[in-house]
Amino acid sequence: MEAWAAARGIRPLIGVDEAGRGCLAGPVVAAAVVLPEGFDPEGLRDSKTLSARRREVLAARLFREARVGIGQVAADRIDQVNILQATFEAMRLALEALRWEGAVGLVVVDGNQPVPRLAWPQRAWPHGDALSWTVAAASIAAKVTRDAWMDQADRQWPGYGFARNKGYGTADHLAALDLLGPCPCHRRTFAPVAERIRRHPPAGR
C-alpha cells in the first residue's frame, strides 16, 4: 500500500485498526497512525504475529516517533450499540485523537468495511495489517493499549485471569465466569456472558 500510494503522490496515509473486537470483556480499542517521512518500518507487522515484548518495544517507538491517536469504547457502550458500531465509534475517536490538520491522502482501514460518516477519503482493506506498514503500526498500538487496560482490569477485578486471557473467551475465563458471574467490564450481550448471567445473576461485583 505504501509503495502504491507513494507512486500516486497520495500522502499522508493514515492506518486504522482495532483490538478486542472478539473479547467477552473490556473495551474495543482502535488506533490511527501516521508514520513520519523516512520512518524505518523494520519489524512492523500484524500485531497477532508478534510476541508481547516485541509489540511493547515497537509501540513505544511508535508513540515516540509517529502520530498516534487512540479511541476506545467501553463494554456498556458495546452492549448498547453492538460491537460493529462500537468498533466504528472507536475508529472515529482514534482519528479525532490524531488532531490532524490539513489534507489527508487516504485512510486505510483494516477489514472489509469502511468507517461510516468519515469525511476523509478511505479504503477498507482486508488483511491490511499484514499488507501495510501503517495499518500494522495501528494494530500494534491498539493491541498494546488494550492489553495494558486488561492488565489494570486484572488488578481491579481479580479472579478472571484478565492479565493472561485479555478478556478473550478462554477456558479459564469461562470457568471463572461460571464461578463468579460477570464483573462490570464484561459485555453482557455476548452469548457466553449472557448465558451465565441467566444462570448466575450479578451480585454487585
Image (tube, helix red, strand yellow):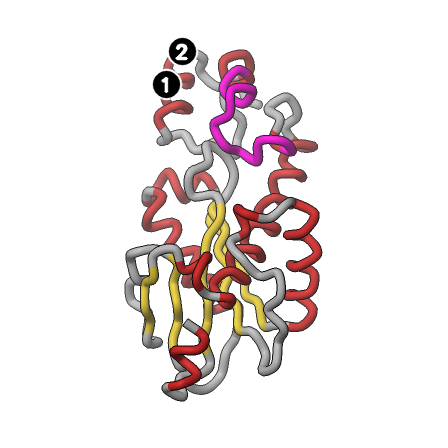
Residue topped by disc 1: 195
Whether residue 183 is visible: yes
Q: Is residue 41 above or below residue 29?
A: below
Q: Is the Cβ of the residue at disc 2 closer than 8 Å to that at disc 1?
A: yes
Closer to us: 127 or 177: 127
Crowding at dot 2, Cα within 10 Å, few <14 / some 14-19 / many 20+, comes out as few
Q: Is residue 43 left or right of residue 31?
A: right
Determine the image quadrant of residue 41. bottom right
Q: Position of residue 68 (x, y in %)?
A: 57, 67
- Residue depicted at x 69% and y 32%: 155
Report the span colored magenta.
Answer: 163-175
Residue topped by disc 2: 199
Amino acid found under the numbered disc labelled 1: Glu
Amino acid found under the numbered disc labelled 2: Arg
Residue 121 falls within the magenta-colored stretch: no
In three-dimensional space, the C-alpha distance between marks 2 and 1, rounded to whole angstroms, equals 7 Å
Q: Position of residue 34 (x, y in %)?
A: 53, 73
Q: Is residue 108 left or right of residue 69?
A: left
Whether residue 203 is visible: no
Numbered label attached to residue 123: none
Q: State the predominant SS element of the stretch in magenta.
A: helix
Q: Secondary structure at mark 1?
A: helix
- Residue depicted at x 56% and y 20%: 172
- Quadrant housing the N terminus: bottom left
Residue 173 falls within the magenta-colored stretch: yes
Closer to us: 20 or 153: 20
Q: Position of residue 43 (x, y in %)?
A: 62, 60
